[in-house]
């Protein structure tokens, strides 16, 4: 049984309402989550996640490209370590994001953080190691674990898109409490990542149809 099939089977049994409400998007789920990535690819993905915080896709992509040029053409732990904060700021990074990228690069360079090894750790332990880096908050860590590490049981209660989608599906009042959201999400474990993908897809589809 594929990971997708196992996840859908779990949703059908543990939360039939969610299963039915997201049925239209089941076929869009990947058979399995993120494939193999190298340390370099994981590092670049984490950098991209930090850069994208509170920015639109186009702006984030522009700043990423500028930062890449400022670091000599590639964003690696070594190139970021060697690039001055002034150059990174000139590329469009805020002071806080510059400090965070420097902290990540230092942790990777001195061996404190092994991004590839995170794949083998339990979700909570992997998150704890990432949250120990200056400037890495829950949302960034959850997005990295979900998309780059391909962890199967990640949920981000701070992601507004997920919360809004849940409010729609469960007829919750706008601004539903974190406790309410987490209680619902707990029923999806150990496949909360797949639930997030379904929620985002349902949100994107409704947003797209409302603009036509």
Image: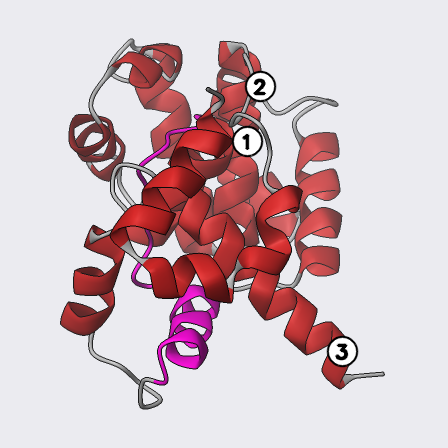
Q: Quickly name the residue at label 2.
A: 41
Residue 152, magenta (yes or no): yes
Q: Residue at x 50, y 40 (%)?
A: 85
Crowding at label 3, few (<14), some or many (≥20) Cα neighbours within 10 Å?
Answer: few
Q: Residue 50, percent across and down?
A: 48, 45
The residue tagged with tag 1: helix, strand or loop?
helix
Crowding at label 1, few (<14), some or many (≥20) Cα neighbours within 10 Å?
Answer: some
Residue farthest toward the right in the current orientation of the protein: 212
Q: Quickly name the residue at label 1.
A: 45
| C-alpha span from label 3 to label 1 | 30 Å
Label 1 close to label 2 by CB (< 8 Å): yes
Q: Nearer the viewer, mark 3 or mark 1?
A: 3
Label 3 close to label 1 by CB (< 8 Å): no
Residue 141 can be seen, yes or no = no
| Segment colored magenta | 149-171
Residue 17, magenta (yes or no): no
Number of the label disc, if any, that sits on residue 209: 3
Q: How is the image coloured?
A: secondary structure
The residue tagged with tag 2: helix, strand or loop?
helix
Question: Which quadrant is the C terminus positioned in?
Answer: bottom right
Q: Residue at x 55, y 48 (%)?
A: 51
């Amino acid at each position: 049984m594929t990971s997708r099939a196992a996840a859908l089977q779990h949703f059908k049994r543990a939360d039939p309402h969610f299963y039915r409400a997201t049925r239209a998007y089941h076929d869009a789920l990947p058979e399995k989550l993120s494939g193999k990535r190298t340390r370099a690819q994981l590092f670049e993905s984490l950098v991209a996640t930090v850069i994208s915080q509170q920015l639109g896709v186009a702006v984030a992509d522009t700043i990423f490209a500028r930062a890449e040029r400022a670091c000599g053409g590639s964003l690696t732990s070594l190139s970021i370590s060697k690039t001055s904060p002034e150059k990174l700021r000139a590329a469009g990074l805020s002071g806080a994001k510059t400090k965070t990228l420097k902290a990540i690069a230092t942790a990777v360079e001195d061996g404190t953080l092994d991004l590839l090894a995170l794949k083998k750790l339990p979700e909570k332990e992997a998150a704890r190691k990432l949250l120990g880096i200056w400037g890495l908050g829950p949302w960034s860590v959850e997005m990295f674990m979900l998309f780059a590490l391909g962890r199967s049981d990640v949920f981000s209660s701070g992601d507004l898109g997920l919360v809004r989608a849940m409010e729609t599906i469960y007829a919750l009042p706008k601004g539903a409490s974190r406790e309410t959201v987490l209680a619902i999400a707990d029923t999806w474990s150990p496949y909360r990542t797949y639930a997030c993908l379904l929620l985002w897809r349902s949100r994107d589809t409704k947003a797209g149809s409302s603009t036509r």
